Image (cartoon, rainbow, N blue to C red):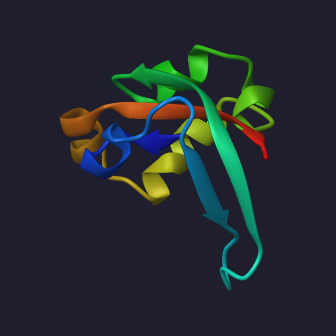
């Protein structure tokens, strides 16, 4: 789950993304985008698929996204779910 801001609007199926693990950003994983899901809110996005597909134990993950993104930005950009596979 991410904000669908300008940077993420460029993501397309088939793209490769490198994720870096917090807090030290040393561990990394490169994945291939297999599907993109768009929704107006994180709650709506979370409702589109089972929680396990978003790597979360329950729908409360949608609420946790506000630790990273403001509700104003959510309203402005909408949200994006990125489904991927390891490469």
Position of 31 with respect to 68 (left or right) is right
Q: Quadrant of residue 83?
A: top right
Q: Residue at x 81, y 36 (%)?
A: 57
Q: Residue at x 67, y 74 (%)?
A: 22
Question: Closer to the camera, 30 or 66?
Answer: 30
Q: Quadrant of residue 48?
A: top right
Q: Residue at x 75, y 28 (%)?
A: 53
Residue 50 pos. (x, y %)? 74, 18
Q: Residue at x 44, y 50 (%)?
A: 66
Q: Is residue 4 above or below residue 40?
A: below
Q: Is residue 67 above or below residue 36?
A: below
Residue 1 pos. (x, y %)? 54, 40
Count of marks, rendered view: 0
Residue 27 pos. (x, y %)? 77, 75
Residue 11 pos. (x, y %)? 42, 40
Name the outermost residue toward the top. 48
Question: Closer to the camera, 58 or 31?
Answer: 31
């Amino acid at each position: 789950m991410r904000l669908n801001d300008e940077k993420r609007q460029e993501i397309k199926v088939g793209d490769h993304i490198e994720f870096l693990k917090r807090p030290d950003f040393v561990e990394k994983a490169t994945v291939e985008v297999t599907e993109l899901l768009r929704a107006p809110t994180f709650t709506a996005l979370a409702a589109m698929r089972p929680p396990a597909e978003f790597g979360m134990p329950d729908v409360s993950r949608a609420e946790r996204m506000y630790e990273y993104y403001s509700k104003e930005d959510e309203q402005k950009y909408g949200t994006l779910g990125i489904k991927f596979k390891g490469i």
